Amino acid sequence: MNRFNALTGFRCLAACLVFLHHNRKYWRDELHPEILRLFNEFHTGVSLFFVLSGFLIAYTYADDPMRSGKSYSRYILLRLARIMPLYWLVLTAYYLDPAFGRMKFSWLTYSLFHGFSDKHNLVGIAQAWSLSAEMMFYFLAPLLSLLQRKHVFYLLGSLLFLFLLAWGAGAYWHYLDGNPERFFYPLRFILTGTFPGRSAEFLAGMLLAAAIRNRRTAWLERTRFKTLIGFLGIFGVIYCIGLFEPDLYGYGRDHAAGRILELFVLPVFVALALAGLIYERTWLQTFFSSKLLVLLGNASFAFYLVHISYVNLKLRQWVLMPDRNFILLWIISIVLYLAFEKPIYNLCRKKLK
């Protein structure tokens, strides 16, 4: 069994958390307040994706992209081939649909640059804002890995500099002419929806990858119950973030303490859970490594694109309310993955050899 199979299955968990978060409004009258508190903060499923991306990219591509301009170009094109074709397909269907396409149109959505703007980041496929953060990480990851190999403080310093640069540029632009498109402005938006503000989550995954690649895992291997501590920590931190919610309609991360928990504490437990899934033979590793969970994990990107916004709202016209389409959405996602996403990516890999 590939020891990373469980990490693929783990993506299914992240996608399901985001689904529960976005559909919680339909269950507000049915759920116990403490359960609803958890669901309110399941947007943190995106944090799970970010930590996992940081790990997989740093582990898989730590050296190759920086060998030459050609290798870097191949790496970027493969990253684009992984997410853009399916995203463009869903986005184009949205714009061409008379019932939806008359809403805001922005060419920025095709480039994912719209995710850098607080005004435009939810235009089109709303949840695609996170793809903008992912893409910025993809472009910078080889350089960040190089800095990390020099010294971890170079990596930390570069991420801090990037955050301050984004914050300062957005604020200066606002000072000059109001920054009408709100690029990298205000601070709340940077911390919520951009790579400079969310970089600590990617960093946690990168540091775990570096430890494994460099075989500096003695401390990890000595730590018992990594999986248990990691998963309990994930849901414990999510619950604690919820304690700062102003009401059942607010977010705990809007409080400074909740934000710190989300950006700096949660990634540590996610990384520990990933380490547990890699090194420990537990029922959770067996579960996430099962053929079904691996398939769902592979289809999780498609599920993320269709679980809210255009596709699920379209299903409401024909089938059920959005919160009732869980299984149907997974079936659609598997079909999209097997019939479109996977073949396109494999073709691109073949052409770029």
Image (cartoon, rainbow, N blue to C red):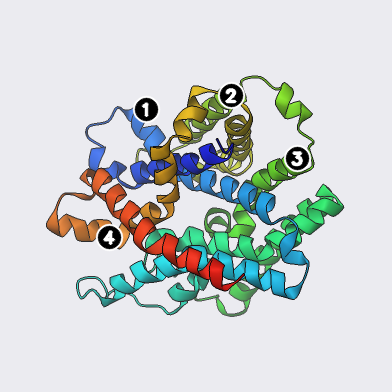
Q: Nearer the viewer, mark 3 or mark 2?
A: 3
Q: Residue at x 68, y 57 (%)?
A: 61
Q: Nearer the viewer, mark 3 or mark 1?
A: 3
Q: Residues within 10 Å of mark 2 (few under 14, many from 20)?
A: some
Give the residue pinned by disc 4. 311
Per the image, label 1 sits on a secondary structure element best described as helix
Q: Quadrant of the N terminus?
A: top right
- Between 70 and 220, the one lying in front of the other is 70
Q: Residue at x 57, y 64 (%)?
A: 79
Residue 229: which disc?
2
Can residue 16 be seen in this snapshot?
Answer: yes
Per the image, label 2 sits on a secondary structure element best described as helix
Q: Nearer the viewer, mark 1 or mark 2?
A: 2
Looking at the rendered structure, the kind of residue marked 2 is Ile
Residue 34: which disc?
1
Give the residue pinned by disc 3. 211
| Residue 10 image offset from top left, x and y in percent | 49, 39
Q: Is residue 284 left or right of residue 229?
A: left
Q: Residues within 10 Å of mark 4 (few under 14, many from 20)?
A: some
First-in-chain label (3 vs 4): 3
Q: Residue at x 49, y 58 (%)?
A: 130
| Residue 159 image offset from top left, x and y in percent | 72, 56
CA–CA distance in space, label 4 to label 1: 30 Å
| Residue 231 image offset from top left, x and y in percent | 53, 29
Relative to 233, residue 175 above or below: below
* Callout 3–callout 1 Cβ contact below 8 Å: no
